[in-house]
Amino acid sequence: MENRKQIVTSMVAAATVIISAVLALGVLNPILQSEADASVADFAIPAGADPWGTAFDSQGHVWVALPGCDPSPQCPAGTAPGKIAVFDPATKTWIKTIQLPGGYGQLLFLAFDRNGAIWFPMLSTNSLGEYDPNQDRFHQWTVPTANAGPWAVAVDKSGIVWFTEHYTNQIASFNPTTQTFKEIATPDANSQPYGITVDAQNNVWFTQNVDTVAAIDEYTTAGVLNVYKVRNTSTSGTGLTPHMLTTDANGNIWWSEGWVTMAGMLNVAQASPGTNNGVTEYNYTGSGHTSGISASPDGRIWVTDSLMNVVGYIPVGGDSFTFYNVPGNHPHDGLNVDSQNRAWFDEEFSNALGLALPSASVTPTVTTSTTITSTPAPGTILGQDTFQRTDQPLWGTASDGQKWGGDANSSSAFSIVGNMGQIANGTSAYNAVLGPSVPDAEALFTGSLNNFANANLGAVLRWKDTNNWYKAYINGTNLIIQSKVNGTTTTLKSVAFPATAGTAYNVRFRAVGSALSVRVWQTGTTEPNIWQASVNDSALASGQVGMRIQLASGVTAKITSFSASVPGNTGTATTTPTVTATTTPSPTATPAPGTILGQDTFQRANQSFWGTASDGQTWGGDANMLTNFSIVSNAGVFANSNTSNSAVLGPTATNAEVVLSGSISDFTNNNFGPVVRWSDGNNWYKAFIDGSSLYIQKKVNGTTTMLKSVPFTAAPGTSYMLHFSVSGSTLSANIWPSSGTEPSGWMASTTDSSLTAGQCGIRLLSQNGATTTITSFVARTL
C-alpha cells in the first residue's frame, strides 16, 4: 500500500544472466529469469486480480489471496468479493479458484489453522472470514470495532486467530470455539498495526506501521503488551515504517522497514521494552519499499522490494543482501518461504505468483550492505538484574526487562529462590548472559558459593558462545583471568585471593580494548582502589556480558545482583576507580539516550550517610549531609525525619527516567518516590506512594501542586519498584511489587512544562519512627 508512482531504479545487484531453463516449469511456460545462483519465475493467476498474501496448506500447495483491488486505503465501492487461487508446486499448475460468496469483502492475507481451515480478514466489510476446504463452507463474523480495517492474520498454537486492525490502532483475537473477539489497543494513538506473527512460545508480534512510532510490539501469553523501539532516536519523517514480520529458527524477530530499504532484527534475548536493545538494522542500496519478509529453513531471511522489483535474501547471521530481478511488477507483502526453501511472492500489478529458487552450490554475488549497530555511549547500562521476583524455575526476565541468555533459561540448574538467582544440582560450567554484544564492557555482580571444592564463581566478557569468552573468577584460593578461544582455554593471569565458602563477594571485571582487569572484595567492605589482576589479550573483540559458574556435586551458587555496563572511560584501569565523584556534576553535552546518569546497588559496608554510589559518584541533595541517611545491611536507609528530604545522583538531564526498589515500614503520614528535574528542595517533579495512591506531584519555586493521582494500595514492609519518566512535557509513572512484573502501560501520566531540566533522585518522608529502605536505584536518559 504505497504511493503508486513510476520509479526508475538502478539495481546494484548481481548481473542478470539469461540462460536456458534450469527448472522445469510445466505447461504454463512462465517467463524465467535465471541469475548466477538462482532461478526466478512467475505464474499468471487464472482469475481475479491484485494478488496479495500467501499461505501453505498441509500438502504444500500455495494459496493466494486475490482481493481484486489495491486498497488506498479502501477498495473502490462496488468491488466484487475477492477470490482465493490454489497453486500446486509439484505440477506447476493452478488447481482451483475459490470465489468468496456475496456479502463478503476483499481479503488481503491468509492463515491456516491446525484443522486445515483458512482464515482471512476483510477490510471493506469489517469482518473476519473462514473457509473450510473439507466442507467447502464459508463463515464470517463482524469485527466489534466499526471500520477497524482488519488486515494481516496469524493463528496461534491454541487455534486462536489473531489479526491487526490497521485503521483503529488495535490488534484483535477471535476464539473459534466460543466465537468471541478480544481487542487490544496499542499505547500509541496513531500506530496503524500492520504485519502480525506468532513465535514458538505462542507470543504474538506485530508492527506499528508509521514512522512517528516505528516499533515492534509483543503481546505475551500472559497478556502483557511490550513495545520495542526500532531506534532510540526520533524516526518521524524518516520513512521508517515497520511492515511485515517473521521469526527465524533462533526465535528472533525480523521485519521489513518500508521506505528506508532495510530489514530489522530483534534479538529477543537482549530485548528490553521501551528501548531498541537487541535491534540491528540491515540496509541495502537503492530507493524502494521493503515489503514482504520471510525466514527460510536453510537460514536466509528473504525480502521483496515492491518498487525496485526485486526479491532477495540476507543470511540470518547478518552480512549482505543478494537480490534478483523479478519477471513481473510490484512484488509485495505475499512473500512466504516453504519447507523446501522455495521463496514464493506475489507480483501484484502483474497478476502473477512469483518463485525464487537459490542454488546452495554457488557463492552469491552481493550488493553493498550496511549494518547499523551504534556503539553504546560510556556509562550505558547493557543489562541489570536485582532478582527481586517470585520463585520460579529458570531465571526468566531480568529486572530491566531483558531475557537472560546462555543456559539461564534452558538449564534446570537455574532458578529464582528467595529473591536470588540460584544455580544448583549440576556438575558442569553454566553460562548466564544478559544484554547486547559490545566491544568494551564491565560486569559487576554479587554472589556466593557454599563450597569452593572443584567449583568457581566468575564474570564473563566478550562471550559469544560456550567456546569463546573471557572470564574472571575466584576458586577459593586464587583470582584468575582466563580466555577460551575456539574451544581452547588459557589462563592469562592468576593472583592469590583466599575466599570463604558461604560468603558473598563482589566481582568487577572490565575489558577495554585489549586490557582485561578485575577486582574482588567481600560484600559489605570497601571496594579496592586498584585492579588486583590485569592482563592484555586481543583474541576476542566483542561479545555479551554475563557470568560463568562451575559447579560440583552439592555446590549451590547464589547471585543477588548483576549489572553490565559500558565503561566510563576509554583507558586502561590500573590504579584508581575511573569515575571522579562530584556533588553537582555539570555536563557540557546532552547525554545520549539510554545513557546511565547514576546507579547504586547499595552493596557496601554499614556507614553514616549514603556516601559514594556503586557507580563511583557521590550522592547529593541531603544524602551526605543529614544523619537520617545511612547504609545498613546493603541498603540505603532513611529514618527519623519529620520533613521531606532528597537524595540525588548524577548530572543534570532534560529527558530522563528513574527506576528504584524500596519499602517503608509505616505509611502513616509518610511516603517515598523518585524525583526528576530536581534543582533543589523547592523545584522538582516527584512520583510517590503513600499506601493508598500513586501520585505525580510538582514543586516549583516552593509551591507544591498535585498533578495526578490514581488509587494504589501499598503494604508497609513490602518492597515495590517505582518507574518515573519525563520526556518533554510528559510525566509518567508505574509501580508494582518487586516480586512481580512492570505493567505494560503507564498507570499515571500527565503533562507539565514548568521545569525543563535537573537531576534525578529520590525524595522521602519517614516520620514517627518509620524507616524507608532503598535496595536499588538507576537513572538514565531518554
Image (cartoon, rainbow, N blue to C red):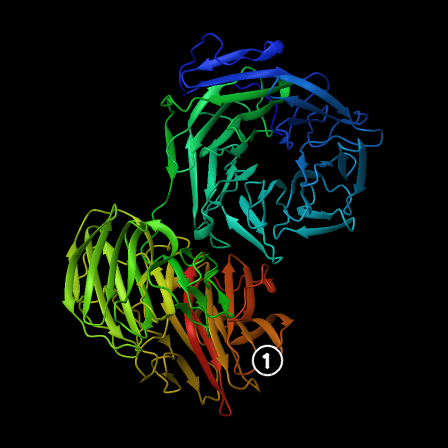
Q: Quick check: 437 above or below 43?
A: below
Within-10-Å neighbours for mark 1: few <14, some 14–19, many 20+: some
Give the number of callouts.
Answer: 1
Give 6 or 653, whichever is nearer the viewer.
6
Q: Quick check: 594 above or below 266?
A: below
Residue 659 shows in this picture:
yes
Task: State the residue lying farthest toward the right.
Answer: 102
Q: Secondary structure at mark 1?
A: loop
Q: As shown in the figure, which amino acid type bears the numbered disc 1? A: Gly
Rendering coords of residue 550 (x, y %): 30, 63
* Residue linked to disc 1: 691
Residue 242 shows in this picture:
no
Rendering coords of residue 380 (x, y %): 36, 57
Q: Is residue 27 left or right of residue 101?
A: left
Q: Quadrant of residue 746?
A: bottom right
Q: Quadrant of residue 693?
A: bottom right
Rendering coords of residue 568 (x, y %): 28, 59
Rendering coords of residue 57 (x, y %): 65, 32
Can you say which quadrant of the picture contains the N terminus?
top right
